[in-house]
């Protein structure tokens, strides 16, 4: 059976990995003023857009996911011919409309695919499963990588589905923003009251950085650390501890809102990489998607993995 894997462009995976394994993107359009970029995870284009716009007016950005009709058209034009079963892995439905759009599109796709497949010479059924990863950005990469691994190993559809849904429930993403004023401005622009003015002002004045956790669809602060570099070190140390304890899948994902060389220079990064190597955990490093950067700000750093529940610290 030909199994396809679809992710939205908020999923922080290296561009080479996406190309190598034929992962299909549902792009998100980012618009700031008159400037517009369709996020196809082109790292060069993302950095150029970032340097030109995000640092100044990124909090004003409008992000537009593929519509129901666009998702339907993509599948009927291409995917129902190229594959027999597709797993569509989306950002948490609590943070974006993408999951709902994909779910609605799936009904139309399953109603309309037969003539398209038959004209291409396929008389077998087509199936589609939309899965909420319950996470975002670096956290979305964990289920996508596992889907690729299981497909390569010859696992069947039922095995893959059960595994991905289990991992989604147990994937934990941590992220540290650099600029709380930016985060507050972005939250206000979206109508999200989760970052207050007093907290942002106090955090910036004292250089206190929150560690945000994405888990089972909920994003919330779980720690506060003085200084961005100290916070990054602490986050990397927690990730090391989980690697040593044993992850549910041998994958750790890192995302950064800027040049990856800056992330690699952060304290604790080298130790984390060495710990992963000793324990057979593959590390995926990615430039954060443009969608991610306009939502959390330039220079944010994130780490994600699948693990048993634990306390931060």
Image (spheres, helix red, strand yellow):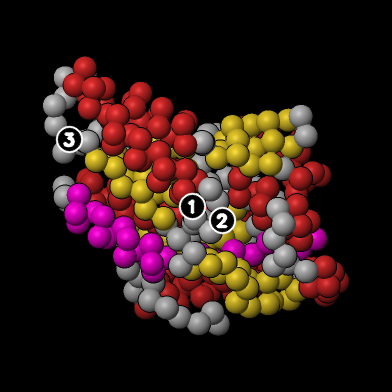
Magenta extent:
157-181
Q: Is residue 212 left or right of residue 12?
A: right
| Residue that mark 1 sits on | 91
Residue at 83% of width from left, 72% of height from top? 198
Percent position (x, y) of residue 144?
A: 37, 50
| Residue that mark 3 sits on | 125
Mark 1 secondary-structure assignment? loop
Percent position (x, y) of residue 311?
A: 50, 82
Local crowd size for mark 3, using a 10 Å CA cut-off: few (<14), some (14–19), many (≥20): few
- Please state, as top left, top right, bottom left or bottom right, where the C terminus lies in the image: bottom right
The answer to whether the residues at label 2 and label 1 have Cβ atoms under 8 Å apart is yes
Residue at 53% of width from left, 48% of height from top? 97
Residue at 43% of width from left, 34% of height from top? 71
The answer to whether one can see residue 267 in this image is: no
Numbered disc in front, either 1 or 3: 3
| Residue that mark 2 sits on | 95
């Amino acid at each position: 059976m030909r199994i396809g894997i679809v992710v939205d462009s908020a999923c922080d995976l290296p561009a080479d990995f996406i190309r190598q394994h034929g992962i299909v993107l549902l792009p998100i359009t980012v618009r700031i003023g008159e400037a517009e970029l369709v996020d196809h995870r082109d790292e060069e284009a993302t950095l150029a857009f970032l340097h030109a716009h995000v640092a100044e007016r990124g909090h004003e950005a409008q992000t537009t996911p593929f519509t129901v009709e666009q998702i339907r058209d993509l599948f009927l034009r291409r995917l129902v011919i190229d594959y027999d079963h597709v797993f569509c892995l989306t950002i948490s439905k609590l943070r974006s409309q993408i999951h709902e759009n994909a779910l609605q599109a799936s009904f139309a796709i399953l109603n309309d695919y037969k003539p398209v497949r038959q004209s291409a010479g396929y008389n077998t059924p087509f199936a589609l499963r939309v899965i909420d990863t319950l996470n975002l950005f670096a956290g979305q990469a964990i289920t996508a990588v596992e889907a690729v691994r299981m497909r390569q190993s010859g696992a069947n559809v039922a095995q893959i589905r059960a595994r991905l849904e289990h991992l989604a429930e147990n994937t934990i993403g941590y992220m540290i923003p650099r600029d709380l004023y930016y985060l507050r401005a972005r939250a206000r622009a979206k109508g999200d009251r989760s970052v207050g003015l007093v907290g942002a002002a106090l955090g910036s004045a004292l250089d206190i950085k929150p560690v945000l956790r994405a888990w089972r669809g909920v994003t919330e602060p779980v720690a506060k650390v003085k200084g961005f570099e100290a916070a990054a070190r602490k986050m990397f140390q927690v990730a090391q501890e989980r690697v040593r304890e044993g992850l549910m899948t041998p994958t750790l994902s890192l995302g950064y809102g800027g040049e990856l060389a800056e992330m690699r220079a952060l304290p604790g990064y080298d130790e984390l990489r060495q710990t992963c190597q000793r324990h057979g955990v593959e590390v995926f490093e990615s430039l954060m998607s443009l969608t991610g950067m306009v939502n959390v700000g330039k220079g944010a750093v994130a780490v994600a993995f699948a693990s048993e529940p634990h306390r931060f610290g």
